[in-house]
Amino acid sequence: MSRRLSIPNDVRELRTAKGLSQQQLGAELGVSRQTINAIEQGRYAPSLPLAIRIARYFGRSVEEIFHAS
């Protein structure tokens, strides 16, 4: 039986507050628009280095952006 991985996060809210598209944020972080979309949808758990890059980009801690379910 496979479990669907769901990682609640605030990436979409933070991105839209800065007026960025998924494509723009992906370019800033060195990943694809599809990766940003999957993270925002909770379908993809970013690697620790990517989670740290996201947190630093938004000036937050990883724990502030990614929440335990």
Image (cartoon, rainbow, N blue to C red):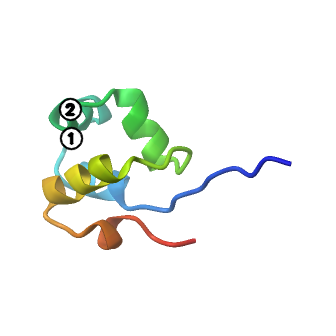
- Marks 1 and 2: in contact by CB < 8 Å? yes
Amino acid under label 2? Gln
Q: How would you rate the neighbour count of disc 1 (Cα within 10 Å): few for under 14, some for 14-19, many for 20 or more?
A: few
Q: Which residue is mark 1?
A: 20
Quadrant of the rendered image containing residue 27? top left
Residue drawn at (20%, 32%) of the image: 24
Q: How would you rate the neighbour count of disc 2 (Cα within 10 Å): few for under 14, some for 14-19, many for 20 or more?
A: some
Residue drawn at (19%, 68%) of the image: 60
Quadrant of the rendered image containing residue 6? bottom right
Residue drawn at (37%, 38%) of the image: 36
Q: Is residue 58 left or right of residue 69?
A: left
Disc marking residue 63: none
Q: Is residue 55 left or right of residue 4?
A: left
Q: Residue 42, how many percent across, how many down?
A: 53, 51
- State the separation of the CA atoms marked 2 and 1: 6 Å
Amino acid under label 1? Leu
Q: Which residue is mark 2?
A: 24
Quadrant location, the C terminus: bottom right
Q: Is residue 49 above or below residue 22?
A: below
Depth check, front residue: 48 or 34: 48
For the residue labelled by badge 2, is the local secondary structure a helix, a strand or a loop? helix
Q: Residue 44, how many percent across, how many down?
A: 51, 44
For the residue labelled by badge 1, is the local secondary structure a helix, a strand or a loop? loop
Residue drawn at (22%, 59%) of the image: 55
Q: Residue furthest front?
A: 48
Depth check, front residue: 56 or 47: 47
Q: Residue 49, how many percent across, how many down?
A: 28, 49
Q: Is residue 15 above or below residue 67?
A: above
Q: Is residue 51 left or right of residue 34?
A: left
